[in-house]
Image: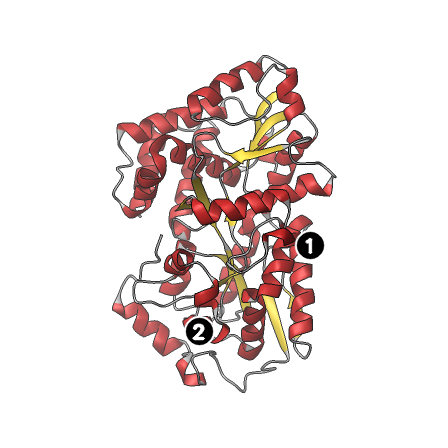
Amino acid sequence: MRINKKSAGVAASVAVLGMTLAACGGGSGSGDADAEGGADQVEVFTWWAAGSEKAGLDALVGVFQEQHPDTEFVNGAVAGGAGSAAKDLLQTRLQAQDPPDTFQAHAGAELQDYIDAAQIEDVSGLYDEFGLTDAFPADLVERLSTEDGAIYSIPSNIHRANVMWANPAVLEDAGLDTSAEYEDLDAFIADLEELDEADVTPLSVATTWTQVHLLETVLLADLGPEAYSGLWDGSTDWESDEVTGALEDFETIMSFTNADRDGLDWPEATQQVIDGQAAFNIMGDWAVAAFEEQDKELGTDFVAVPSPGTAGTFDFLADSFTLPVGAPHPEGTEAWLETIGSLEGQTAFNAAKGSIPARTDADPAEFSEYQQTAIESFANDTIVSSLAHGAATPVATLNAISDATSKFTTGASDLDAYQSELAAAAQG
């Protein structure tokens, strides 16, 4: 999904309020060259505070310190599932004109709000300087670009959202196929019913954002990639019978999930599969690290396959880094962004985090068995943008969809009301 530039006025605001890249020479920097510190440090604001995310950040920092030994890394990580706590604090700082030197954001439509508020700079000049236009797939560069060709972030990785994780021992005990591959949701729901009778949680989920994550995979399965993408560009009617059918499937699938879901975050839900308390979990491929950290082997101790009905489609999201307007150490920011886009940085980071490089020149042999399958899929499958992780919609739309989903899954609204609220959220 291409980022939309809403008006020429927004572009003018960015030009006036931001210190343009071109003004700094070579189109590769912004901000006051004499700002405090310059290149001597960089505060990096992320939500990578624990687990594989922290391990990935640590690996990335190691490369950064090798590439830029004179620039001090200042860790601005804020803990919180899917970055919700970090995003709240970040917005407070941006509104107070106290930005970090760079901040993590999901690439794609999530950036639109920052663009509209003139809070981040165009970094397309750095793509030329660092050779990223050639290193990244053309389709990815297209998805990162506004209609006028500006690019506002550099991705550190690619994640796949439509992955289902399964415990084959639990499936075998229930007399089910341990490969856990499903061509459609009907077959999946039939097995959920079988598991429900076997005194095991059929499908583990967690708090609201993981339920929205599940919702997007159900919409993708029932609508197909073209109509799913149409939900975000207006070509698919949210009030259609096809969407109604998908929401009915979502309601059915949610009825087979764990009762304690709203008190959990994704690691706890994934752990239920690892421990054999649940058969399935649908979560992005950052979950692979949770299995590998506990010495679980793919194909033996766990199965990772496209979520039911989505084989041949890669539900895409990417973590990326920005150059905020008024960053106090813009040269330090550029140094960090250079490492983010580098082959060495992307290899070290993604090998630890479980995602895959955005670069096409990375060696698949450097990565795990699962990651190699993801690299192949990203190169060959139909790519769509994730709802739950900021690639498909602006933050305000996602927040409204999340609110509607929470009401629905806690029983505060019925399906008709839910569908109407989703339609209203998509229209803004």
**Residue 199 higher or lower than 119, as above or below:** above
Q: Earlier along the polypeptide chain: callout 1 or callout 2?
A: 1
- x then y, percent, for residue 305: 54, 34
Mark in front: 1 vs 2: 2
Q: Residue at x 32, y 31 (%)?
A: 243
Secondary element at tag 1: helix
**Res 127 visible:** yes
- x then y, percent, for residue 113: 39, 59
Residue situated furthest right in the rendering:
295
Which of the pair 175/209 is nearer the observer?
A: 175
Q: Residue at x 62, y 43 (%)?
A: 369
**Res 100 visible:** no
- x then y, percent, for residue 245: 34, 25
Task: Give yes or no for contact between labels 1 and 2 (Cβ–Cβ under 8 Å).
Answer: no
Secondary element at tag 2: helix
Say what amino acid the circle numbered 2 marks: Asp
Direction from residue 276 to residue 116 in the image, left or right = left
- x then y, percent, for residue 47: 59, 55
Q: Residue at x 64, y 40 (%)?
A: 267
Residue position for label 2: 128
Which of the pair 365/322 is nearer the observer?
A: 365
Distance of mark 1 from mark 2, alpha carbons?
Answer: 30 Å
Quadrant assignment, res 65: bottom right
**Number of residues whose C-alpha sits closer than 10 Å to that of mark 2, classed few (under 14), some (14–19) or many (20 or more):** some
Residue position for label 1: 55
Direction from residue 13 to residue 177 in the image, left or right = right
**Number of residues whose C-alpha sits closer than 10 Å to that of mark 1, classed few (under 14), some (14–19) or many (20 or more):** many
Q: How many marks?
A: 2
Q: Residue at x 62, y 65 (%)?
A: 344
